[in-house]
Image: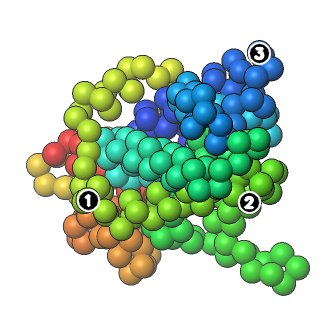
Amino acid sequence: MNGGPSGFNNAPVTRAFVIASALFTIFFGIRNRSNKLGLSFEDIFGGLHVWKLIVSVFSFASTPELVFGLYLLYYFRVFERQIGSNKYLVFVLFSVVVSLLFEVLALALLKDPAVNLITSGPYGLIFASFVPFYFDIPVSTWFRVFRVRFSDKSFIYLAGLQLLLSAWKRFILPAICGILAGSLYRLNIFRIRKAKVPEFFASFFSRFSLPSMGSSPAAPSRTVPSYPGRRVERTYPAPSAAEPPEDAIATLISMGFDGNSARQALVHARNDVNAATNILLEAQSHH
């Protein structure tokens, strides 16, 4: 399970966020200040260190956290491909701001000025992303290890658990606040799931970010003639003769796609939901 095609294709917001997190972490790591970026009651209500609020959104506290955190951010680019960069940027801003507000509220209630209760890093966004991951990403394969049944989604949960257990006392609040933020977004509070930023901002991230990394080698393209009035050129596996599963069709319909288009896209994507989502999104962009 890799979240769709490799690299940051159709995921400029994720790419920019990953690059920013890596650069902030390296910068403060070189200056030996990573362990001083955690938030405490004194930072918010004593010295009012606004810079800490901003930096703590991007900079991880250690190299292991950076590795696991960037891996999860990279995987969750699948959501940007599903809903588009304009809506995904709203999800990012909503998750970061709301989780940060919950963290500040938690610090105000706990009132412990001596302890950095909240570690630094984009954990509001990471743990908020686990909510749509749980509800919207279908299981594609199952396997057993010592008679225990696992799905291909288990690796993502294990990566999140590794982050949580690495320093659970400082991670538990960001994790809970992130999950609450993700839940509010999924509940469509204030109709937030309908909101999207102007096209200019998504285009800005496309120009701002570095070239895509890890993209697959070029392969001969073929035409997907499934949508009247337009033809989309993209490399995908040969169509599958198998009838698309109803749960896969339902997943695409829940994202707002037409049932017939979803069925045709799954056929062309060999019943791969992520690849079918990319086909549908690209078809919409050419509409």
Q: Position of residue 175 (x, y in %)?
A: 63, 56
Q: Are marks 2 and 3 in contact (CB under 8 Å)?
A: no
* Residue that numbered label 2 is attached to: 161
In terms of sequence position, does the residue under pointer 2 or pointer 3 come before the other? 3
* Residue that numbered label 3 is attached to: 31
Q: Residue furthest left?
A: 229
> What residue is shown at x 31% (from left), y 63% (from top)?
188
Q: Position of residue 233 (x, y in %)?
A: 31, 41
Q: Is residue 255 placed above or below 27 in the rendered structure?
A: below
Q: Amino acid at mark 1?
A: Phe
Secondary structure under tag 3 reads loop
In terms of sequence position, does the residue under pointer 1 or pointer 2 come before the other? 2
Disc 1/disc 2 C-alpha distance (Å): 31 Å
Front-most of residues 38 and 75: 38
Q: Amino acid at mark 2?
A: Leu
Front-most of residues 261 and 235: 261
> What residue is shown at x 38% (from left), y 20% (from top)?
207
Residue 232 lies in what quarter of the image? top left
* Residue that numbered label 1 is attached to: 190
In terms of sequence position, does the residue under pointer 3 or pointer 1 come before the other? 3
Secondary structure under tag 2 reads helix
Left or right, 144 with reference to 256: right
Front-most of residues 130 and 173: 173
Q: Nearer the viewer, mark 2 or mark 3?
A: 3
Tell me if I can see residue 260 in this picture.
yes
Q: Residue furthest right?
A: 146
Q: Position of residue 58 (x, y in %)?
A: 59, 32
